[in-house]
Amino acid sequence: MTEAFMHYIWFEKRFFPYQETVEGVPVEIIDVGRPNEDAGPDVFNAKIKLGSMVWAGNVEFHLKASDWYSHHHHEDPVYNSTILHVVLQSNRLICKNERGEIVPQIILRYPKFLEERFQVMLSPSQAFIHCAPYFQDVSRDELKFFLDRLLVERFERKVNEVSMRWEQQNNNWDVAFFLTLARSFGFSTNAAAFELLGQRVPWLKVLALKTSKSLSWEEKQRALEALFLGVSGLEPQGTRSAYEDQLHHWMLWWKEEMGVTLVNLAPKLWKFLRLYPAGFPTVRVAQFSALVLKAPQNLGACLGVETLPAVLKWLEVAPSPFWQTHYRFGSSAVLNEKRLSKASREGLVVNTVVPFLLAYARELGDEGLGEKVLHWLEVLPPESNKLIRGFRDLGLEVHSAYDTQALIQLKTAYCNTRNCLRCVVGHQILKY
């Protein structure tokens, strides 16, 4: 058992009505109080009737009574207001606070089937989720309400990340967008490497290049490819092709004309294994540079007035002609334009554009924009991956990216971390 389980029993009032202290004094729990998320006793402002006396104060949970001393509560005046010590195992009958006063102690009594079901949820399992045997019994209405909450939870985190980048970049929305886009462009397998790439790119110099009137579009494209491929560390050393000679020329241009000192990533950071060639990091970096060049100035304002089809169209980019016949340096391939696929563009909307515009809308106080981009999640088709297939195999209907994002939050933040007691599914399983 865990203290989290004790919290569940206590705050959901699943304990038996009759409780008594280890000395046999009757205890009535009048008010369970409220949980304390900070240091100190586990429960604030509880109310109990101990014998004939009503007490108000704090409550502390421990698996074993001796933990009171292991955690040094007997030396901490913060615990002097504890009116009840709730344990599962009373291996020490008397516990005293810092003033030397005995703290009343009970062994928490509750229906044992709750413990059995909780153990099932925590026990090792090869199932997709530990509660799979009970999942069909969960109320779909309650699950839908919970998934709505999880979507908000997931995008609050994403929006806060965008806002943090915006503040770190001196309130520059364009740079905040490109940094967010960089991580998303790694598409999970190379997300960490792409994030490092984004951090090492001199974005203010890139913005200056984009607005330059002395360079043609083709020259800007080649310059950005040289910069991103150079910083990535993916450009090979030694004998070079004509394209690589051009990249080298533009890397020198960045150094001599723009005053940029490149700090390259280690090539070993990039993963090629088990990726389709179209997803090789060399291709993704070239696509990324093309999208950066295509992006309009003042991204927040520009994207904020666009429709979803227009945003998906804007994300439809292809790298320079060299990459139409190559997936990596040193070997040619059959002609393929290598435009970003529809599924990839939809993924970038979900993971970059929507969080970015939500952060932008929050900063401007534009509720209409926030509602508009959240609606995009309901319009976009559901993502297709092993995680979503796992939920579908359990009989769950998945209709849109709104659903899949909520389910990703459920699996990663609750199922994988055994956070069952904060999950509506876990509550439903323990209810019957």
Image (spheres, grey):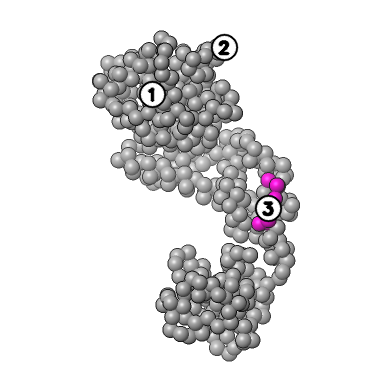
- Say if the magenta span includes residue 21: no
The picture places residue 308, in percent across and down from the top left corner, at: 51, 32
The answer to whether 355 is drawn above or below residue 49 in the figure is above
Q: What separation in Å lies between label 1 and label 2 (alpha carbons)? A: 25 Å
The picture places residue 274, in percent across and down from the top left corner, at: 59, 28
SS class, disc 2: loop
On residue 334, the disc is 2
Of 358 and 176, the residue lying toward us: 176
Tell me the residue at 49%/45% (across/down): 155
On residue 124, the disc is 3
Q: What separation in Å lies between label 3 and label 2 (alpha carbons)? A: 47 Å
SS class, disc 1: helix
Tell me the residue at 45%/28% (across/down): 267
The answer to whether 167 is drawn above or below residue 297 in the figure is below
What's under tag 3, amino acid-wise?
Answer: Pro
On residue 230, the disc is 1
Query: Magenta: predominant secondary structure element?
Result: loop
Q: What separation in Å lies between label 3 and label 1 (alpha carbons)? A: 46 Å
Crowd around label 3: few <14 · some 14–19 · many ≥20 (10 Å): few
- Say if the magenta span includes residue 126: yes
Quadrant assignment for the C terminus: bottom right
What's under tag 1, amino acid-wise?
Answer: Gly
The picture places residue 244, in percent across and down from the top left corner, at: 40, 14
Magenta residues span 121-128
